[in-house]
Image (cartoon, helix red, strand yellow):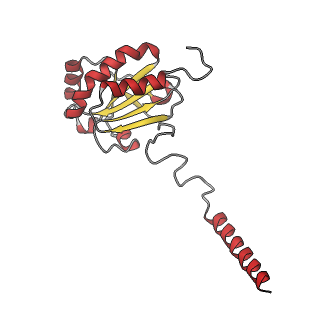
């Protein structure tokens, strides 16, 4: 008699639990709308489209198949200034191997004139995009400058580095691992 009662209680609890799961499930996918709250390692990098100072638009998703480094920065940021020569050097070394560096200026915290002077001072050779409305800063939940995202050929974030400056050796290690041919691929 006692074991039947336990079975009935267990079955009742199981039915109530399944009912609760069924009722509370997000069937529409609206909890995160299929997106993660901020770019994280192992997840697809949120797409964005920004323009250069000359008005040419670049869209992150159009760069699939290439390794992309997204670096959020501002001209007044000391660590940003310190890591720009290393980013420039790495860009020149690996651009022919499929590397694209997108330097996303936090323009809501900067000015076009300061950005222009910064580009000239550091003789930047990679793409500098203007985040004039703070769209990418919000989308990528920018909390510190600089912040760098290493994105693989598949569009997935492989590493996030908040703060800086990034050392050339760190940049080189991350980029070489992302540019390395996959198993079974011919170099």
Q: Position of residue 79 (x, y in %)?
A: 23, 33
Q: As displayed, is residue 106 above or below residue 53?
A: below
- Residue at 37% x, 40% y: name it: 135
* Residue 67 visible in the shown view: no
Q: How many marks?
A: 0
Left or right: 29 in relation to 99 = right
Question: In this view, which residue lies farthest toward the bottom?
Answer: 1
Q: Position of residue 112 (x, y in %)?
A: 23, 28
- Residue 73 lies in what quarter of the image? top left
Residue sitting nearer the eye, 122 or 13: 13
Left or right: 114 in relation to 184 = left
Residue sitting nearer the eye, 26 or 171: 171
- Residue at 24% x, 39% y: name it: 109
Q: Position of residue 12 (x, y in %)?
A: 72, 76
**Quarter containing the C terminus:** top right
Q: As displayed, is residue 123 above or below residue 128?
A: above
Residue sitting nearer the eye, 104 or 174: 174
* Residue 99 visible in the shown view: yes
- Residue at 57% x, 23% y: name it: 182
Q: As displayed, is residue 95 above or below residue 52?
A: above
- Residue at 29% x, 22% y: name it: 86
Left or right: 149 in relation to 86 = right
- Residue 139 lies in what quarter of the image? top left
- Residue 87 lies in what quarter of the image? top left
Q: Position of residue 75 (x, y in %)?
A: 22, 31
Q: As displayed, is residue 133 above or below residue 14?
A: above
């Amino acid at each position: 008699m006692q074991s039947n009662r336990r079975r009935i209680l267990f079955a009742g609890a199981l039915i109530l639990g399944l009912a609760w799961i069924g009722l509370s499930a997000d069937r529409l996918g609206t909890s995160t709308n299929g997106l993660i709250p901020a770019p994280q390692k192992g997840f697809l990098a949120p797409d964005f489209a920004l323009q250069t100072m000359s008005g040419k638009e670049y869209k992150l998703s159009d760069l699939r198949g290439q390794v992309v480094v997204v670096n959020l920065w501002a001209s007044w940021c000391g660590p940003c200034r310190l890591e720009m020569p290393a980013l420039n050097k790495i860009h020149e070394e690996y651009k022919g191997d499929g590397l694209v560096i997108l330097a996303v200026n936090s323009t809501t915290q900067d000015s076009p004139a300061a950005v222009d002077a910064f580009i000239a001072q550091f003789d930047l050779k990679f793409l500098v995009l203007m985040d004039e409305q703070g769209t990418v800063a919000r989308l990528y939940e920018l909390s510190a400058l600089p912040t760098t995202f290493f994105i693989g050929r598949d569009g997935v974030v492989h590493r996030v580095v908040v703060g800086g400056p990034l050392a050339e050796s760190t940049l080189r290690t991350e980029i070489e691992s992302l540019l390395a041919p996959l198993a079974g691929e011919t170099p």
